Amino acid sequence: MAFIITAGTLAVVSALLYRAGGQGKEPDARPKWMPMWMRKSWVRDWLCPACVLIPLAIVKPTWWMIPVYGLMGGALSTFWDFITGKDNFYLAGMGCGLSTFPLIFGGYPWWGVLIATAALAGIWGLWSEKQDIDWVEEMGRGFFLVFSTAVILSL
């Protein structure tokens, strides 16, 4: 029960942090109440991975979470536009999912990493294709980052 409450709460927190990191400095950007100090890319890149790893640490803590934190922060810092010419959220989701690979050495199942990677790639790509409202799109990706990764890997 603690896992579900923690994962759900941190999925919402991650949604807010993900949007904050991509919101920009425009004062009329939504949500308007988001403080300016949170509107920096490091907020998304380095706080969202913590939201993924905290619920996993409840299930099975391992030192392998340290490299995952760094790899996921790096994965969140790119949308692969340098390869595809535009933001590619299928690849971005795949990169975030693959960043959990070191957890295999900490006792997490390899098939869980593969399923979480495929799920995150598909969910992010489809969500971003179908969603036209920028703040809803970003908050959704932040939510799915935690919810899909943490839930699948905790099975």
Image: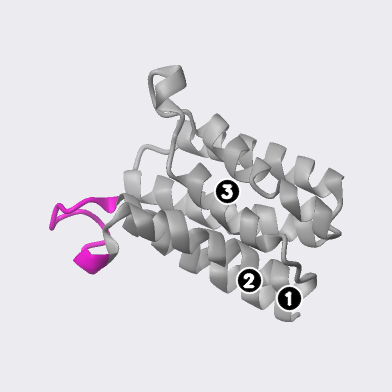
Q: Measured along the vertical axis of the image, is residue 72 above or below residue 60?
A: above
Q: Contact (CB < 8 A) between labels 1 and 2?
A: yes
**Quadrant in which residue 79 is drawn:** top left
Which residue corresponds to the image point at 59% horizontal and 44% vertical from the top-left?
96
Element carrying mark 3:
helix
Q: In percent of the image, x 54 and y 59: which residue is there?
A: 49
User: What residue sits 67% from the left and 53% below the top?
Assistant: 149
Residue range (magenta):
23-37
Q: What separation in Å lies between label 3 and label 2 (alpha carbons)?
A: 16 Å
> According to the image, label 2 marks what residue?
54
Colour pattern of the rendering = one colour
Q: Is residue 29 magenta?
A: yes
Question: Could you tell me what secondary structure mostly forms the magenta stretch?
Answer: loop
Residue 97 magenta: no
Q: Is residue 135 left or right of residue 96?
A: left
Mark 1: amino acid: Ile
Name which residue type carries label 3. Leu
Marks 3,1: beta carbons within 8 A: no
What residue is drawn where x is 55% and y is 54%?
70
Mark 2: amino acid: Ile
Q: Secondary structure at mark 1?
A: helix
Residue 95: % across, % down: 59, 38
The residue tagged 3 is 71
Does residue 80 appear left or right of residue 3 in this picture? left
Of labels 3 and 1, earlier in sequence is: 1
Near mark 2 (Cα within 10 A), the count class, few <14, some 14-19 or many ≥20, is some
Mark 3: few, some, or many residues within 10 Å (few <14, many ≥20)?
A: many
From the top left corner, tell me how far across and down residue 134 is, in percent: 33, 44
Visible in this render: residue 81? yes
Q: Which mark is residue 58?
A: 1
**Above or below 150: residue 71:** above
